[in-house]
Image (cartoon, rainbow, N blue to C red):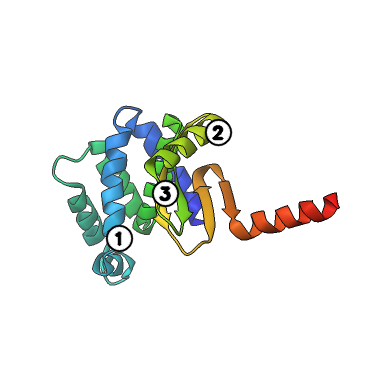
Amino acid sequence: MEQLIAKKYVKGLVEAVGGKKIESVAGVLKQIAEAFNDEKLAAIIASPEVSKGKKEELMIGLLGKKADKKLVNFVKTLGLHNRFDLIPEISALLQKELQRRANRYEGVVESSKPIEKKLLGELEKSLSKYVDATVVLHPVKSDRDGIRVSIEDLGLEASFSKERVASDMISHILKAL
């Protein structure tokens, strides 16, 4: 439910701010969303004892003195409807929207062994052709016996494990006999 509400706010923010300023606004919102990782801030926003006005002052203070007026009005609107807790979700959805507009997506490659930059580049190039978009992959160390590639925003996931390749080869050999 929160995601549906956040989508409406993202749509409104994108329309209000416009194409050129939306990236800087997204950067500011991302910083505020990261501030929500602080337990004290999250507790203040969730507290019914703190007035809407104080919460609004706090959030506008986080924007900085040179904040875009439309962004300030956006934050005031969130405060009016008691929706400050949606800021992390709004920020995440706004980042996805910017990726979609730029036709650029980020993903991860999980492996137990470090992946060479050359191989990572080739994988990015192949996936970019496949999805007709720019793909940037980040290596992540895991305990997986093989490789797993995941691009969440595209709903793309592929994995290769040694066990599966071995079992497929055995199955193929047995069928040939």
Nearest to N terminus: mark 2 or mark 1:
1
Q: Quadrant of residue 9?
A: top left
The image position of residue 65, as x and y in percent, is: 13, 44
> Disc 3 to disc 2, how far (Cα)?
22 Å
Q: Which mark is residue 131?
A: 2
Badge 1 crowding class, 10 Å Cα cut-off, few under 14, some 14 to 19, many 20 or more, is: some
The three-letter amino acid code for the residue at tag 2 is Val
- Between circles 2 and 1, the one closer to the viewer is 2
Q: Which callout, 3 or 2, points to the residue nearer the camera? A: 3
Q: Amino acid at mark 1?
A: Phe
Q: Which residue is mark 1?
A: 36
Q: Quadrant of residue 118?
A: top left
Residue 172 in the image: x percent, y percent?
Answer: 78, 51
Q: Secondary structure at mark 1?
A: loop
User: Does residue 70 lie above or below 44 as drawn?
Assistant: above
Seen at 82% across and 56% down, the residue is: 174
Residue 99 lies in what quarter of the image?
Answer: top left
Q: Could you tell me which residue is drawn at 78 percent across and 53 percent down?
A: 173
Q: Residue 157, position in %: x, y?
A: 57, 48
The one of 169 and 111 positioned closer to us in this rendering? 169
Q: Position of residue 1 (x, y in %)?
A: 53, 56
From where the camera sits, is residue 81 visible? no
- Which numbered disc, 3 or 2, marks the residue that appears first in the sequence? 3
Residue 115 - label: 3
- 161 left or right, relative to 141: right
Q: Residue furthest left?
A: 65
Give the distance between the C-alpha atoms of the residues marked 1 and 3, in whole angstroms: 33 Å
